[in-house]
Image: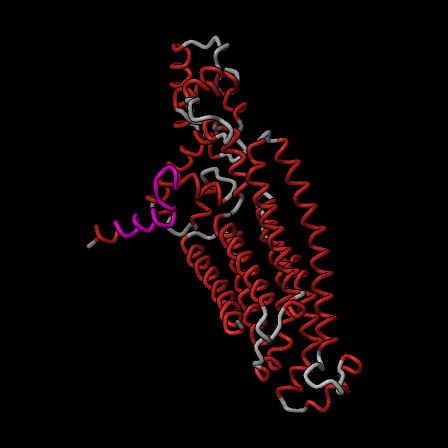
Amino acid sequence: METLNHSLWLMLGYQSIGFFLYLLYENLKEKSTTRSLFAVFMMLFGLTSFLLHIRLFTHTSSFYVLFPLIFSVAMLLTPVFYFHLKSLLVENFVLRWIDLLHVLPALLVLIIMLPFWVLITSHNTEYLDSVYGILLIKSAPGNQTWLIRLIINTLVFLQLLVYMFYSTGLFRRFALKMQKRECPDLKFYVTGTKLFSFSYLLMMILLISHQYFHSESDSLVSTLFIGSVLILNIGLGYFGIRFNDDYFFQCAEFLHSNPKANLFVTSRQTGANLDGEKYKTSCLCDELKDVLVEELEMLMKKEEPYINPKLKLEDVANLLNTNSKYLSQTINEKFSKNFQHYLNDYRCAKVIDLFQNMEYDDYSIEGIAATCGFHSRSSFVASFKKYSGKLPSQYRKEIIEGRIVQKK
C-alpha cells in the first residue's frame, strides 16, 4: 500500500501540472485574468504536492535542500486562490500593484527559513541550533524540525481563516448585485462556486494536517487521505477551467435578457409563446414597428451611437422620439435579440471594418474594441465570437494574411 500512496502523491503533482499546462494553452489562445490566476494556483499546488511527496517518502537529502521552499509555496496558495475567486465575483476585476502585499507573508517565511537552507546546503548543520534556538531539538534525531513545521502550519491555517473572512465578504457583495439584477436562476451557479470554494478549504485543511494522516507503514488511512485530496483537486480543476472573466456577470445578463435560457422554463414553452405573453397588452402595431425599425437602422448607420459604451435603451429611444418600452419590443420581435446584443452586433461589424482598415494595423485589438464601444475585453470576445464564429485575434490574423497573399 505504501507503493500505492507513493504513486497517488506523484499523480496529484502531475495532475496539477497538467491542469496548469492546459490553462496556459487556453490562455495563449485567449487571454483571461481568471484562467491565468487559476493556472498559477495549479502550478503552485503541483509544486506543493511534489515537495510534500519528497518530505513524506524519505527523500531526505532533497527534502532538506527544499525545506524553506515548501512553506513559502504553501503560504502563496490561499492568496492566489482568493484572487481567482475575486476575479469571478467582482465585475471587470483587475490586479493592482497593492495586491502584491498579499505575497508578503510568503516572502517573510522564506526569509526566516533562508538561514536553514544556507546551513544545510553548506553542510554546516552544527550551527542550526545557534540560529533557530529552541525551534530545534538535537536530542530527537530525525525530528529536529517538528516545531518549525508546527509554527508554519499554524501560520498557513491562520491565513486560511483570514481569507475565509475576506471571501465571505465577496460572496455577500456579489449576492447583493445579483439580487439587483433579478436573476434568481444564477443561484444555481453561485451554489457551484460555493462548493468550489468549500472544496478548496477542505483540501487545504487536509494538506495542513497531512503529517497526522500519513504513515510510512502500510496504512489505509494514508491512502484514503491522498485519494480525497486527489478527488477534490479534480473537482477544482474541472470548475476552474470552465470559469472565465466576468463569467457570472455575463451569465446574469444573458439569463435576464433571454427568457428561453431560464433554467426553470420548461422545454414546452417556446420563445414565441413567451414573447406573446410579454407583449400581449402592447398597442404597438406592425406598421409602427416597421417605421421604428427603419429609423433605428438609419440612426445606427449614420450617427453610430453604439460607439458610446454607456449608451442606454432610453438614450436611443429619446433620439427616435419614442419610448423605451416600444423600442425594446420592436428589437426583440424584429431582430430576435435584446437591446444589448443588438448594439454589440453593430459594434462587432464596426470592429471588422477597422480590422480591414490598414490605418488601424498598429492598434491593439483591445484598443479597437474600446473605440467601437466595448467596455470590457470579456464581453467583446464573447460577442465577437458569437457574431463572426471566430476569435478576434484569429479573424484579424486571417485578414492580414489575406493582404500578404494579394500582394504576392
Outermost residue on the left side: it is 408
Residue at image x 68%, y 41%?
172
Residue 355 is left or right of residue 199, and the answer is left
Instruction: Please say if 180 is above or below 293.
Output: below
Q: Is residue 321 above or below residue 357?
A: above
Q: In the image shown, does 393 or 332 lie closer to the viewer?
A: 332
Image side of residue 132 versus residue 65, left or right: right
| Residue range corresponding to the magenta coloring | 385-402
Q: Residue at x 40, y 54 (%)?
A: 29
On whether residue 286 falls in the magenta region, the answer is: no
Residue found 62% across the figure and 70% down from its top: 214
**Magenta: predominant secondary structure element?**
helix
- Height in image: 8 above or below 174? below
| Colour convention | secondary structure
Q: Position of residue 19 (x, y in %)?
A: 47, 59
Magenta stretch contains residue 390: yes
Instruction: Please identify the quarter of the rendering in which residue 294 is found.
Output: top left
> How far from the left and from the top, in percent, is residue 200?
60, 55
In the image shown, does 262 or 316 lie closer to the viewer? Answer: 262
Residue 338: x and y, percent? 46, 27
Q: Residue furthest right?
A: 134
Q: Quadrant of residue 129?
A: bottom right
Q: Is residue 321 visible?
A: no
* Residue 319: image location, x then y, percent: 50, 21
Q: Quadrant of the C terminus?
A: bottom left
In this orientation, which residue lies closer to the viewer: 234 or 93?
A: 234
